[in-house]
């Protein structure tokens, strides 16, 4: 995955079950990977996961880079670690709001 | 983006968890997803999915099923007269209509609620449409012909992502849903509850005792009510010994109209363990844009500081992903405590109507047409609709400030202040009063307003009514009050 993507784009891991959706991304080409392999826009063949990049993803969590310039939602959990341009993303700590509806 | 993703995630991550309780009927998230897929499979190309019935599992399935099929979901107010429904259906066609009534409409296929969620199911994921319409919702039309407000998938997803954490509800949590399907809060309740993983307990027809019974029977932990519902619940408790135990209830949120201060104070005294939240939002903003949370409620109730104390009458602060601005009529941004028109901006704001277009200005601000002010900490105080302002000899009078004063009188249970024609001033203040236990003297009421406000605010006409005319979702029909006062 090395294209300019838009908010709403869904990406699948090519080594595990992980799926993510871009919520906020800069308008530049990003190298988005999971478990050491580039992520793809469709479901494809699954390769081998890099055991050093098998931190796992959690469904429903938001993943951000260090400067929070981009944000992805994990829509399906898997075993890989998500990276953008070689840097691992972290879970964004959410502020819980009271239920309003 | 597509709102079906909400249900897809829930069905995959917690498929066996109970999603809906409706009488004896119970559906898990996996079963709700299957129901949505069965509905999607029934839609012909080009058909909208319309819904003309009370709350039901088919309604929740329909929101997601329409999304899956890539067509708008259009709930219709089942309390409207047949001719009014006819007029709306003509604007919705072609459509598949979920309904229990036998009336025929041109270019509309009909199906019952139970038949809607059986049979073949659509497989796969929802098609991604960049700017697709998820919901078309008719406004209540209190001032004219109903407008069809458009909410896109991107608006509703921005609301959910900005206000709810996925699977944040514990397995024991249950939300009592009493708001009808054609109200934005009825739609957002389905989306929020599903994303949070909080079981929806549907109460199709509201009564205070029915609400209390179901809350107790289903161990309800969360509920949303419109102010009139809470008023009826609180009064009902008062008439029946003054005490009702709701030990499981943790959170009660309210919105959709102005909450009378005595009602929320009474409710907080009745159930001190409950977290109260005031939610302010509009159909056009995908529901809530502002929240007054539980801590702010308790602080206000306990505070001696009038600046804090008055916040119980506030709708709170903007959601993190939403911006608010108060502007004067000439467009200048108002300072703290200065009243003006309320504007809102954010991705969840749709702000567009079918056939009319977007109402957002070039900077993305949507005019709510509500009047209000913000204090120095961003707490928003609403003061009615811009259209309801009384203009007396060039002086703008907000009905809300006169209503608040009249409500302080022991003999006043409810009040509506509206403009009445006046030969000298153009318009003057009229008040429709619902009495509490005794009939207050008109002179007393006028003296009260004169002493707390000023003489221009004193009602020139007062009538007494048994009840004020609210619609079923708690919206005061000021037009009806104006007509009654003008007829006196």
Image: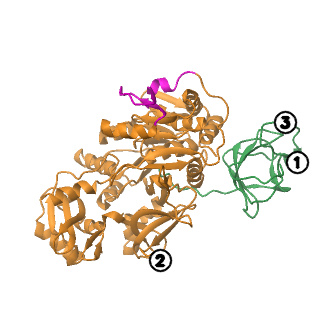
**Residue B181: image location, x then y, percent:** 43, 40
Q: Are marks 3 and 1 on the same chain?
A: yes
Q: Give the range drawn in magenta.
A: B93-119
**The C terminus of chain B appears in which quarter of the rendering?**
bottom left
Inspect the magenta stretch and tell me whether residue B116 lies in it: yes
Q: Residues within 10 Å of mark 1 (few under 14, many from 20)?
A: few
Q: How many marks?
A: 3
Under tag 3, what secondary structure?
loop
Mark pair 1, 2: CA separation: 57 Å
Task: Please name the residue that numbered disc 1 is placed on.
Answer: A52
Mark pair 3, 1: CA separation: 17 Å
Image-quadrant location for residue B133: top right
Report if residue B77 is visible in the image: no
Closer to viewer: mark 3 or mark 1: 3
Under tag 1, what secondary structure?
helix
The tint of chain A in the picture is: green
């Amino acid at each position: 995955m090395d294209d300019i993507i838009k908010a709403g784009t869904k990406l699948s891991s090519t080594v595990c079950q992980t799926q993510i959706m871009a919520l906020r991304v800069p308008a530049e080409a990003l190298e988005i990977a999971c478990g050491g392999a580039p992520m793809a826009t469709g479901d494809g063949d699954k390769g081998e996961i890099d055991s050093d990049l098998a931190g796992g993803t959690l469904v429903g969590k938001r993943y951000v880079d260090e400067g929070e310039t981009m944000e992805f939602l994990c829509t399906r959990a898997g075993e890989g670690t998500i990276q953008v341009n070689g840097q691992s993303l972290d879970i964004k700590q959410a502020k819980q709001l009271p239920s309003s509806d | 983006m597509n709102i079906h993703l909400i249900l897809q995630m829930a069905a995959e991550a917690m498929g066996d968890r109970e999603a809906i309780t409706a009488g004896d009927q119970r559906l898990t998230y996996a079963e709700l997803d299957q129901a949505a897929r069965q509905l999607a499979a029934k839609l012909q190309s080009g058909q909208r999915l319309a819904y003309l019935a009370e709350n039901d599992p088919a309604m929740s399935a329909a929101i997601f099923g329409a999304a899956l099929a890539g067509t708008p979901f259009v709930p219709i107010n089942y309390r409207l007269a047949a001719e009014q429904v006819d007029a709306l259906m003509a604007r919705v066609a072609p459509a598949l209509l979920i309904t229990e009534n036998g009336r025929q409409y041109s270019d509309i296929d009909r199906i019952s609620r139970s038949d809607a969620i059986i049979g073949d199911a659509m497989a796969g994921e929802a098609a991604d449409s960049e700017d697709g319409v998820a919901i078309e919702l008719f406004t209540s039309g209190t001032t004219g012909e109903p407008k069809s407000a458009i909410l896109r998938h991107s608006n509703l997803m921005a609301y959910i992502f900005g206000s709810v954490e996925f699977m944040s509800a514990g397995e024991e949590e249950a939300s009592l849903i009493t708001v009808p399907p054609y109200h934005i809060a009825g739609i957002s309740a389905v989306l929020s509850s599903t994303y949070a993983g909080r079981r929806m307990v549907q109460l199709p027809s509201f009564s205070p005792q029915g609400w209390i019974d179901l809350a107790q029977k289903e161990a309800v932990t969360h509920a949303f009510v419109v102010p009139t519902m809470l008023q009826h619940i609180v009064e009902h408790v008062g008439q029946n010994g003054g005490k009702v135990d709701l030990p499981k209830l943790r959170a009660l949120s309210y919105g959709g109209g102005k909450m009378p201060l005595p009602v929320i104070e009474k409710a907080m005294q009745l159930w001190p363990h409950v977290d109260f939240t005031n939610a302010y939002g509009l159909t056009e903003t995908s529901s809530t844009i502002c929240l007054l949370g539980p801590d702010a409620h308790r602080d206000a109730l306990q505070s001696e500081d009038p600046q804090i104390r008055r916040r119980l009458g506030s709708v709170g602060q903007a959601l993190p992903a939403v911006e608010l601005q108060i502007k004067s009529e000439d467009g200048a941004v108002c300072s703290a405590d200065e009243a003006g028109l309320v504007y809102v901006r954010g991705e969840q704001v749709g702000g567009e109507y079918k056939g009319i277009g977007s109402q957002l200005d070039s900077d993305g601000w949507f005019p709510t047409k509500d009047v209000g002010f913000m204090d120095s900490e961003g707490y928003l105080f609403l003061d009615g609709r811009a259209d309801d302002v009384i203009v007396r000899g060039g002086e703008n009078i907000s009905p809300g400030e006169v209503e608040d004063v009249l409500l302080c009188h022991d003999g006043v249970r409810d009040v509506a202040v509206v403009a009445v024609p006046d030969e000298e001033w153009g318009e003057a203040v009229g008040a429709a009063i619902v009495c509490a236990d005794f009939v207050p003297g008109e002179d007393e009421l006028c003296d009260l307003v004169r002493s707390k406000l000023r003489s221009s605010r004193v009602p020139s006409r007062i009538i007494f009514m048994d009840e004020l005319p609210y619609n079923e979702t708690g919206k005061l029909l000021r037009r009806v009050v104006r007509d009654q006062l003008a007829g006196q």
